[in-house]
Amino acid sequence: MHDLNDDIAKILISAEQLTRRIGELGQQITADYRGKEPVLVGVLKGAVVFMVDLARTIDLPVELDFMAVSSYGASTQSTGVVRILKDLDRSISGRDVLVVEDIVDSGLTLRYIVENLRDRQPASLRICALLRKQKVRAPGPSIDYVGFDIPDEFVVGYGLDYAEQYRNLPYLGVLRPELYRGDQV
């Protein structure tokens, strides 16, 4: 039986660090949205674990909705072409919307999502990302809430995957490069 932990070069962010920081984000979001009922829009599939944990730390009525977009395919790098695979179930017109993203890498996918959602006339639109890679990105929307800034390494776990694997790891780890090296564009 294959142990996914053996594929991890190093643990970047432990389960305990994730729990602590997500609690802090939830407190900040609760304070910022006091008196409102935000709609959390999760970007499938990577943000699901983070969004559920984050929602449980927000001490306000919240609604959850999801979008699925594709910009990576089965690769480790964005193709730069974004497609909506699943759209929101309800209108966000006049609502306070918080986009919940797992990782901001190039920023291209997030820019596309934000532009798309702004066209739907929400009352407000903010962004919460669990991870932001420390590298040069295309100009894009500012991120209102950031869990962790991380180096430009390929990370998996806590919802993030490689070829649909590793999402169930309770921490964020750097995948051993030899497992995806032939995937680089």
Image (cartoon, rainbow, N blue to C red):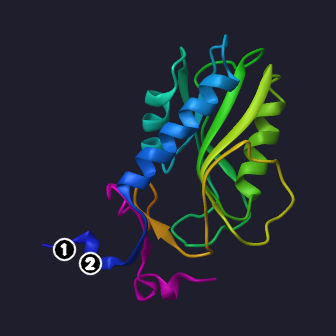
Q: Which residue is mark 1?
A: 2
User: Residue at horizontal 65%, vertical 24%?
Assistant: 31
Q: Is residue 132 left or right of residue 111?
A: left
Q: Amino acid at mark 2?
A: Asp
Q: Is residue 137 left or right of residue 26?
A: right
For label 2, the SS is helix
**Can residue 181 be seen?**
yes
Does 79 sit left or right of 124 as displayed? Answer: left
Query: Which circle marks residue 57 in the picture?
Result: none
Residue at image position (70%, 40%) is 127
* Place of residue 45 in the rendered image (x, y in percent of width and height, measured from the top left): 48, 48
Q: In the figure, is residue 48 to the left or right of 25?
A: left
Q: Nearer the viewer, residue 127 or 12?
A: 12
Magenta residues span: 163-185
- Classify mark 2: residues with Cα within 10 Å, few (<14), some (14-19) or many (20+): few
| Residue shown at the point (84%, 53%) measured from the top left | 140
Cβ atoms under marks 2 and 1 closer than 8 Å: yes
Q: Position of residue 7 (x, y in %)?
A: 32, 78
- Choose mark 2 or mark 1, whichever is in front: 2
Q: Residue furthest top?
A: 35
Q: Quadrant of the N terminus?
A: bottom left
Residue annotated with mark 2? 6
Tell me where residue 163 appears, x and y as whole percent. 42, 67
Q: Quadrant of residue 118?
A: top right
Q: CA distance from mark 2 to mark 1?
A: 8 Å
The C terminus lies in quadrant: bottom right
